[in-house]
Image: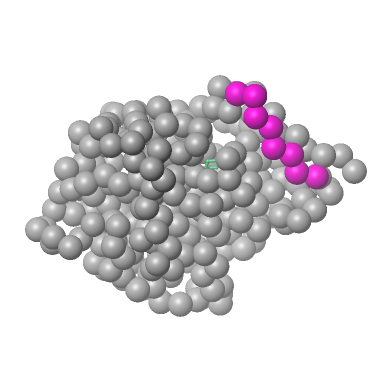
Amino acid sequence: KTSKVQYYNNPMWPGEAHSLKVEKILYQGKSPYQEILVFESSTYGNVLVLDGIVQLTDKDECAYQEMVTHLPLCSIPSPKNVLVVGGGDGGVLREIARHDSVETIDICEIDQLVIDVCKEFFPNLSMGFKDPRVRLHVGDAVDFLRDSPEGKYDAIIVDSSDPIGPAQALVEKPFIQTIARALKAGGVLCNLAESMWLHTHLIQDMLSICRQTFKGGVHYAWTSVPTYPSGVIGFLLCAKEGPPVNFLTPVNPIEKIQGATKAGKELRFYNSEIHRAAFVLPTFVRRELESY
Ligand SMILES: NCCCN[C@H]1CC[C@H](N)CC1
């Protein structure tokens, strides 16, 4: 059997490799934006790879999708209008759908082929597209946010790939500013913020951009995803200044999630305690991020 060695030869992960044994290649293709590979692994279920980078596996996707969704949505009272940037696999949509207060779910995904491939090979994730509140926009989120009305969303989740391909623009200041404008007062952004072990400089840059733009507070949180480089990934929770609700910070969950999804899928990772714990940082990380 072949083994799929991911040489992270791009500048994001110099000199690192991560290999998963390939039991069977299920799909290989190329969209206008990226190379797409799906294979059946020995112990992680199906694996989605974009441009040679593992995006998700059946086994550990819950750690990422549940945290990137419930850290923001469980930190604001009854979110109604939510936007997902990226997220074409549908996993974040599945998680948002657990919140009964949500009335509309906009998703802006640039690559239709990712959606089609995930509908075929990742039914437990693409089930998210079946929720009647979902409105799909296929296109560049930079344009979508630029054209979005001011103050429309309670929460925006940037569920993108790494900022070295189609998602490069999503960590830059102009885009972050359009996100802040599209959020309601007191609204919250959760975006991907990479690994505390590998990407301190990127996290510092994002922290300073977000802290200039979000006056309600910016907090780094992290979770464990065994198939991502270094085994952990981070998020930035950014609160737009809003109603004077002192206890309200992304660190303290205030919203209880209604249990299983409509399709009976229980939470596998998120809970209120792990919500709080996600913001507790190792000493070296506190030191590296404190002055940003
Ligand atoms: N929606 C699936 C997760 C997409 N997020 C990224 C995948 C690749 C990782 N290196 C960083 C997170």
Residue 269 in view (yes/no): yes
Name the quarter where the N terminus is drawn.
top right
Say which residue appears at 40% left-offset and 55% top-offset: 278
Name the quarter where the C terminus is drawn.
top left
Residue 147 in view (yes/no): no
Q: Foreground: 241 or 104?
A: 241
Q: Is residue 182 above or below residue 290?
A: below
Q: Foreground: 292 or 40?
A: 292
190 vs 76, left or right, is right
61 vs 273, left or right, is right
60 vs 7, left or right, is left
Q: Where does the magenta region start and end?
A: 14-21
Q: Is residue 9 above or below residue 207?
A: above
Q: Residue furthest front?
A: 283
Say which residue appears at 46% left-offset and 65% top-offset: 270
**Can residue 260 be found in the magenta stretch?**
no
Q: What is the basis of the colouring in this image? A: one colour
Q: Residue furthest right?
A: 1
Q: Position of residue 12 (x, y in %)?
A: 54, 27
Which quadrant does ligand 1 occupy? Answer: top right
